[in-house]
Image (tube, coloured by chain):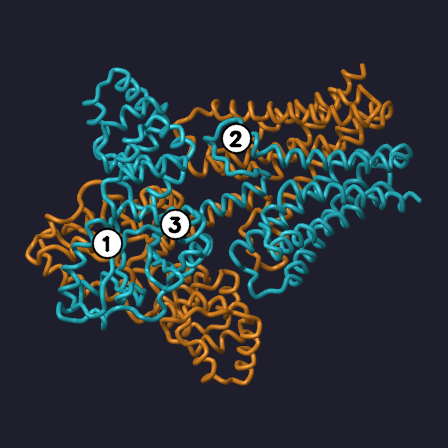
Chain colours: A orange, B cyan
């Protein structure tokens, strides 16, 4: 059932909550997908949604909890007793359980783990908590299905049936040896269509098997799954023992966050802010870049001050300061955005750094030339000062070319020295270009008016 | 086998190509994944890679062709004869085949379709070509597996084995009635573990089945698959007849492109440019925004000219022009980026427009206040002009608040009137804020120096 979440529906639901009409609520929300329930509940105050939450089935409420966005979950979880959290963790898959525990205080973590119902579940979660959340180990879960090479298909089906109970989504079966070393992959399709007496050894895929190691970065995992179109990938430790599985739904989030992070950084937002984040978190994440920009502005004011004599002689020079700095900023942001995206999709693996910067230089020259001609035309038609027109045109050309080169070069260099290139875009490039642009402008003016 | 693509390897390969040493090439490239082959070949000139391409197995070369990025494929395909293209299309899955044909001239399309080996493949491709590429119909393929409710599990397995030959990745089986109307989904897992005599009717999932209609936008398909963690989704026509299937690998590309498009638009890049795109395409996609920025700069120059008298009286006012415009730009870009991302992830479905703008206003006031205090401190310590310090501080506060409001309001309004809100970010917001910022600055100066 697809739920249309209208304002009217929300108001009706709020009324049911304040009337404590649990029967009506449950009837209304029957068969609604946990992801939709999470959307719905998180548009209510945590106290209101807790009332509904308590009436949901255990499995459903655990899923809803993990579908909340992080900020809302943080507020919501404060309303749950330790006992209630233990109940939720019991029902979560290992990766979600580890993520949830990761959001709690250290002391609370241990208390919850010690109270879990199933000791195997508890030890699996404990194991997952060891890994950095930005690695394959941090993404994987412990629910997967294994088979042995010497099983026949019919025995395999029996064994798998037992294992499959706790695994929600089975895409393929991992074939391991007696030490749990990964040997290959068995597809459900080949298992389904094979003769019952066939040995697994003769139907599983041994070559070109994709896997990742626990310490590989989540970006590398995402890149591999995307490139090879995989829906799940086995995770092995340093001894090639199978320790987990990563499914595409978790990786889609990584891919999206990665792309969004680049956009946010390029927009000068330093922390991961969501639209639902509070005013203070929002301000904190934005202030650093604004203050850097402010420092750049102060620096720019000193440069202009240094050329005050020229402005005194020809005040019209001041008029075009915004034009110079804005164009430098715009061109720099474009160049760096293209390079950052290229780096993110690993486009430059086989290309020299110089080739790419060379292309940006050409583009900059072309854009700069067109801008110069346009601005010279405008100044020729409207301003009665040939020297001013020449100054603006020449400096605009130089500024655009330099901004393009800088916009390309800085992220490429940052990437080489293993700093996130997205840092370079946005306010940082803009500020640097402002200062360089102004300097060029006044130096050109100096020579033109000499 | 994972291929490490080093510069040395590439050079060795180029040498093999120029020596026409096909045996060595094939040995070197055996067992390499088509996605890696595509990476490798596209770092060579099309003429060189064509030599290698011709030696690949048919199935492999078809996959390699579709793994090329669009710009490279466009150049590469010019080297193929119509006959060769027909051969490739014969080996492609229907969605890839339709995508490839979509990149060709109309007349060429018909010629190729008429020469295809399998008439069913040809008619499926023809059907797919009808759909807009940005809809579910444009994303789907025709390779899927269906079952009937009245089959028993053992009969089902026999029937499916026949169907499964042409389907590469089987995730689930679609249950249809005699008119091909979609009834539900059967998981491979439940089929594998069911008793052979069980009827499909009793094991397939009838409720909460997710599907999309052919005319739904690819963004909506991506949102649904992402939200409900699906690896494949059935596509039905307006009469609910099953007509295709969309798998997650195709949707991952949509999700990524969507996020990248927002980033590019916010950076002032109007067309989809990849790092591999040529200089002219690159320039063309960037010029519009630069010219808009230029027009903004000219407008700004006229505003400053209007306040020339004030600059004459106090030349130091000109020094802080870059500071005012840069800060306004930075704050505006931040606000709009947050709103654009919120809109992209549908965060505001249940929130009023005013609530969000209200929050941005609060953030703007906080950021503005801090900036004002900082800049007043600096000017108090270093500049011997109290009035100037007051002017900058007051106008900075006003400019930041207004930039935050505008940055939030514009994308929200554009979204309401169904224009892509990402258009609002980047150069457009920056330019508008420059002009408004300057006006505020000089008006404040007028009153302070009165």
- Real-space Cα separation, disc 2 to disc 3, in angstroms: 26 Å
Left or right: A297 in relation to A114 = right
Q: Position of residue A215 (x, y in %)?
A: 34, 45
Instruction: Give the SS element for disc 3.
Output: helix
Residue at coordinates 80% horizontally, 31% vertically from top-left?
A: A319
- Real-space Cα separation, disc 1 to disc 3, in angstroms: 25 Å
The numbered mark 1 sits on a residue in which chain?
Answer: A
Left or right: B29 in relation to B285 = left
Q: Quadrant of the C terminus of chain B?
A: top right
The numbered mark 2 sits on a residue in which chain?
Answer: B
Residue placed under numbered mark 1 in the picture: A172
**Dot 1, how many residues are within 10 Å of its Cα: few (below 14), some (14-19), or many (20+)?**
many
Q: Nearer the viewer, residue A171 or B367?
A: A171
The numbered mark 3 sits on a residue in which chain?
Answer: B
Left or right: B120 in relation to B196 = right
Residue at coordinates 86% horizontally, 25% vertically from top-left?
A: A312
Q: Is residue A376 visible?
A: yes
Q: For marks 1 and 3, give the one nearer the viewer.
A: 3
- Real-space Cα separation, disc 2 to disc 1, in angstroms: 43 Å
**Dot 2, how many residues are within 10 Å of its Cα: few (below 14), some (14-19), or many (20+)?**
some
Q: For marks 2 and 1, give the one nearer the viewer.
A: 2
Q: Is residue A132 visible?
A: no
Residue placed under numbered mark 3 in the picture: B139
Q: Position of residue B18 (x, y in %)?
A: 28, 16
Q: Position of residue A222 (x, y in %)?
A: 38, 46
The disc label shown at residue B281, or none: 2
Do tags 2 and 1 sit on the same chain? no
The disc label shown at residue B88, or none: none
- Decide which of tag 2 and tag 3 comes sooner along the chain: 3
Q: Tell me whether circle 1 and circle 3 mark residues in contact (CB < 8 Å).
A: no
Q: Is residue B437 above or below residue B30?
A: below
Residue at coordinates 55% horizontally, 46% vertically from top-left?
A: A264
């Amino acid at each position: 059932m697809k739920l249309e979440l209208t304002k009217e529906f929300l108001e009706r639901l709020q009324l049911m909550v304040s009337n404590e009409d649990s029967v009506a609520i449950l009837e209304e929300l029957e068969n609604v997908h946990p992801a939709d329930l999470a959307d719905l509940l998180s548009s209510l105050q945590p106290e209101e949604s807790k009332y509904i939450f308590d009436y949901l089935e255990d499995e459903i409420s655990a899923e809803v909890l993990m579908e909340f966005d992080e900020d809302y979950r943080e507020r919501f979880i404060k309303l749950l007793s330790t006992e209630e959290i233990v109940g939720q963790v019991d029902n979560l898959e290992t990766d979600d359980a580890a993520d949830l525990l990761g959001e709690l205080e250290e002391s609370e973590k241990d208390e919850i783990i010690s109270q879990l119902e199933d000791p195997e579940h508890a030890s699996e979660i404990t194991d997952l908590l060891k890994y950095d959340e930005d690695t394959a180990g941090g993404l994987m879960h412990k629910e997967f299905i294994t088979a042995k090479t010497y099983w026949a298909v019919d025995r395999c089906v029996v064994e798998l049936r037992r294992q499959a109970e706790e695994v929600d989504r089975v895409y393929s079966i991992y074939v391991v040896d007696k030490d749990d070393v990964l040997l290959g992959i068995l597809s459900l399709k080949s298992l389904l269509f094979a003769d019952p007496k066939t040995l697994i050894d003769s139907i599983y895929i041994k070559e070109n098997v994709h896997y990742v190691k626990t310490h590989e970065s989540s970006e590398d995992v995402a890149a591999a799954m995307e490139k090879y179109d995989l829906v799940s990938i086995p995770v092995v430790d340093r001894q090639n023992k199978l320790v987990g599985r990563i499914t595409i739904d978790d990786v889609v989030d990584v891919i999206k966050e990665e792309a969004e992070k680049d956009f946010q950084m390029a927009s000068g937002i330093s922390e991961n802010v969501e639209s639902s984040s509070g005013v203070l978190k929002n301000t904190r994440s934005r202030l650093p870049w604004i203050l850097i920009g402010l420092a750049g502005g102060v620096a720019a004011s000193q440069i202009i001050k240094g050329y005050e004599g020229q402005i005194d002689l020809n005040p019209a020079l001041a008029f075009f300061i915004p034009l110079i700095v804005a164009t430098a900023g715009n061109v720099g942001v474009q160049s760096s955005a293209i390079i950052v995206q290229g780096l993110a999709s690993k486009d430059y693996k086989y290309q020299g750094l110089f080739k790419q910067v060379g292309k940006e230089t050409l583009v900059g020259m072309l854009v700069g030339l067109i801008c110069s001609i346009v601005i010279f035309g405008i100044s020729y038609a409207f301003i009665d000062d040939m020297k001013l027109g020449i100054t603006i045109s020449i400096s605009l050309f130089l500024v655009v070319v330099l901004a393009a080169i800088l916009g390309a070069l800085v992220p490429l260099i940052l990437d080489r020295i293993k700093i996130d290139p997205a840092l370079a875009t946005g306010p940082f490039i803009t500020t640097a270009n402002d200062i360089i642009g102004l300097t060029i402008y006044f130096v050109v003016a100096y020579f033109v008016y000499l």
